[in-house]
Image (cartoon, helix red, strand yellow):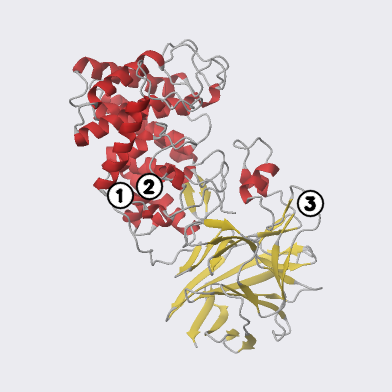
Amino acid sequence: MHLPHQRGPLHDLPDTPEAYDAVLADVVEQALRRITPEGNLEHPDCDDDIGDTSLGITSLLALAWQRGKDPRLPEAVRRSLAFHLRERVYTDDNPGYPNLRLRDSRLPYARYVLEPGAHPIGDWPSTVWALLQLVDVLELADGLLDDEQRQELALLGHGYWRWLTEVTFFNPQEAGNQAIGCVVGGLMLARHLPQEAAAVRARALRLYTDEIRAHRVRDRGALLPPEHGGAYDNNYGPISLSFLAQAHRVSGEEVFAEDGDTLARYIDARLTGGGFDNGGPRYSEQHSAFESVLGLRYFGQRIGADLGRYRGDSRWARHAVKPDGGVDGHFAWMLVWQIQDDSRWQRTPSTAPRRHQLRSGAVSVAFDDRMTPAIVEAGGAYCLPAAVGRQHGFGPVTDGFLLCRPMGEVRVRDLSAGNLTAKLVTKPVVGRDHVLRYVRSLYVTDGAVLWTTVAVERLDGDPYLLAGLPYAEDDGDRVRRTSQAPVASAGRLRLTHPDGQGPDRFDARSELTQEQAAFALAADPRGYGNPDEGWSHLVASTALEAGPVTDAPDDLHVFAVRYGTSEPFTVRVEQTPEGLTVRTARFTAVLGPDDAHGEPELTLLPA
């Protein structure tokens, strides 16, 4: 079973002017067939996310006219714009909308659902989207609209802006992408309001500073715009990056470049080399597609990283579509900006070592905030943190207790030698006995396989290394579910599955995806619950369990696992005057004593 939203890397999409002209030509033909006598360009099956969609198609028609001067388009633009102004602008308060600060303002807004009171919670982002579609039409209006029509459209945009920033609470869904989108709308609108330009621009920049930037959330060493109560979401995080790219393009303000660079480096670190990722407070595995292209391309070029490896949803490869493949205008503004932007994909990886990532060739490890692997990629397979006794991660297990949560500072050392790349992670941990122990985890890769060696003070009982949950594999075109991975151990290795059934036990042999399982455990309904929080309630999962090597020093338990191949291997571990020495057929690594600053020393010698 393929994961429904983990498809091709986004940089595989052709992005030449000819390719974009072909996309627009398809949109034009669909729109001209669909347009009603009233000028409506909405998809016939559209019932939510509807308040901006006809206007979005109008903006694409305006862009197509500017690029090709198709004589059929001016009349379609004027008719569809008149439809929006006449039928999709609301000034009466939506019954039940809870986020108003001022009632009966008579200022315009767009509805998420047209029926009064049906689902008003989405009106704020729908109005942001309508503002963005509107400013795109304004900027593409040369030769299409007369001065009176331009002025009417600009006044509507100012009304949308005031409703978003004065009549309602700002960013009521705590969604960073919506909030930054609103700021972008204000910055673009200001260019079309001669009298209010300075005030609108200043207000937009102040909202970004005070309401978005001041509330950033730290994860993996980066300050990020919060998304639906979490630090990062797979679907919306890259959309926020696209908004930051557009904000920098239209304003030139360095703050958007700085924050975009930070978010881009964060995405680069958490993304596997194969482009797979999961996790988020709204959607764990659902990936945006064309909505991410602008940000990933723009900032990938800025930071020198191949962010285009991010796997998108190719059903939305160019624009939002309905199940029948028909174009939907909901995200049209992003396609407009993507076509207008002239940045190009950075195709080669960043070579700078990252604290929260180890990456070489076809091997990568993305580390979480505690420097525990969040995803291990090797041999085309992806392993997630396994669960035992409601504890999640990679690390030694003794008496049912997982030793991976740090109790103190986590030390990291990166090193390269020949074609080998290594990372040593040292973290203090406390078990049930309240004894402080040091877990030393060494990761070494040659770009084809990954060796992991974990050493810890000798443990009681029958300890083992929780070495991951085999979850997905790359078949060259898509990512699909699996319950196996090419893994070997220098000790015994077994693949276990949880006893019993229930939503809090995840068996990788089932067809259930991680996201579906996480939503089932979340406190709120699917789409509104926090899958990251839901997944934290998982009690047990399929797991790789590796026993200790037999010839370790008497005072240590040492575990050795190799990802990327199931071929047997041997490892020798001994205590030498230089430190703990690990020997394999490919390398010798010495985990030396701490230096004068308490940092662990590491020596790596290719065989």
Residue, disc 1: 15
User: Between disc 1 and disc 2, whose residue precedes?
Assistant: 1
Q: CA distance from mark 2 to mark 3?
A: 40 Å
Q: Which residue is the site of mark 2?
A: 293
Number of numbered callouts drawn: 3
| Residue 565, label in figure | none
Mark closer to the chain start, 3 or 1: 1
Residue at left offset 65%, top offset 66%: 428
Q: Is residue 50 left or right of residue 555?
A: left
Which sits earlier in the primary sequence, circle 2 or circle 3? 2
- Give the residue furthest to the front: 33
Q: Are marks 1 and 2 in contact (CB under 8 Å)?
A: yes
Q: Residue at x 36, y 29 (%)?
A: 56
- Horizontal arrangement in the rendering, residue 78 relative to residue 574 (left or right): left
Is residue 377 shown left or right of residue 551?
left
Check disc 2 and give the amino acid type: Val
- Amino acid type, residue under disc 1 in the picture: Asp
Look at the image and tell me in which quarter the N terminus lies.
bottom right
